[in-house]
Image: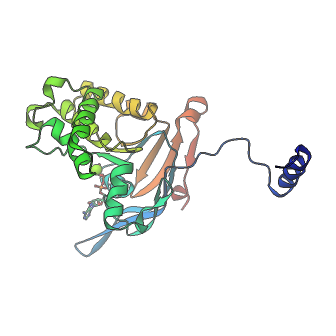
Amino acid sequence: MSSPQEEQEARAELQEVAPAQPVEKVEKAIIIAEGLSKHFIQAGEEIKAVDRVNLRIAPRQLITISGASGCGKTTLMYLLGSLEKPTSGKLLIDGVDVAALRGRAEDDFRRQKVGFVFQSFNLIPNLSALENVMLPMEIAGTRHKDREERARQLLSQVGLEEKRHFHRPGKLSGGQQQRVAIARALANNPSVILADEPTGNLDSKTGRRIVDLLVQLAHQGRTVVVVTHDRTIARLADKRMELEDGRIISIKNNSNVAQSGTTTKTAATRK
Ligand SMILES: Nc1ncnc2c1ncn2[C@@H]1O[C@H](COP(=O)(O)OP(=O)(O)OP(=O)(O)O)[C@@H](O)[C@H]1O
Ligand SMILES: [Mg+2]
């Protein structure tokens, strides 16, 4: 055991070699994209659906991505959720280089980290709401009793009444189906929720409830990235990104916007 004097000397020595840490705590990004691109060849022509995107998304934030039809929003979300492989560039999720993962390890990682909500719900028509939510847990190897219990809890959390848990998607309204889809995205307790125009197929009142639910998820500590044209959700977001021709052309921090309307122009706008 060292004496208090020795400890003091050791600390003084450390301070000499280690530079002072910045006072502001820099939080690790949960999603980092570097030069992320996805190109398609169609009729002999190359389409740069996502073109050298750089972004950092901090944990526990609500981010919106918007832009004109065809500008690459869905493609970018698929890349961020590693549902598709990039043509080039790098994607780190929670510090892990997704491209380095293979087979089962890649599937497990994606299931564990990311939940995806599609515009068109994408529920399995011949399974009940409950079974739809249980399915990702079954694939992940959760015991039947545990997954049923969790699915019930999640469906209640997203506001689907118990009497509807056994209904098939066809018997549910659009808003109810989207609630089931959100519960399904939460099934394996991912830290990131990616939602591609989750209110696009809903009337404005139902859409508003879904927006509230996504905002609530971000407040509860998840990172929520939403492709949306909905101004309400964009106003509530921590950060708003604008996509044009596969490139991010602006990033706005809402905290700054409230004070000074600051817009950070990215490299893409300075080409
Ligand atoms: N699988 C594919 N094969 C060929 N081209 C594709 C493919 N997927 C997307 N694209 C093209 O990439 C571009 C971006 O498409 P994407 O679906 O990402 O746009 P979007 O911004 O989501 O549009 P929307 O607002 O209409 O949903 C478009 O030009 C589209 O035609
Ligand atoms: Mg789309």
Q: Tell me where residue 109 appears, x and y as whole percent.
A: 37, 56
Q: Residue at x 29, y 41 (%)?
A: 187
Q: Is residue 255 left or right of residue 15?
A: left
Q: Residue furthest front?
A: 1
Q: Tell me where residue 34 appears, x and y as whole percent.
A: 50, 62
Q: Where does the C terminus fall, quadrant-wise?
A: bottom right
Q: Is residue 71 visible?
A: no
Report the number of discs: 0
What colouring does the structure picture have? rainbow
Q: Tell me where residue 248 appears, x and y as whole percent.
A: 46, 53
Against 261, residue 38 (above or below) is: below
Q: Residue at x 57, y 49 (%)?
A: 28
Against 166, residue 82 (above or below) is: below
Between 178 and 15, the residue placed more toward the observer is 15
Between 135 and 65, the residue placed more toward the observer is 135
Q: Is residue 239 left or right of residue 233?
A: right
Q: Residue at x 41, y 51 (%)?
A: 243
Q: Is residue 268 visible?
A: yes
Q: Tell me where residue 50 appears, x and y as whole percent.
A: 38, 61
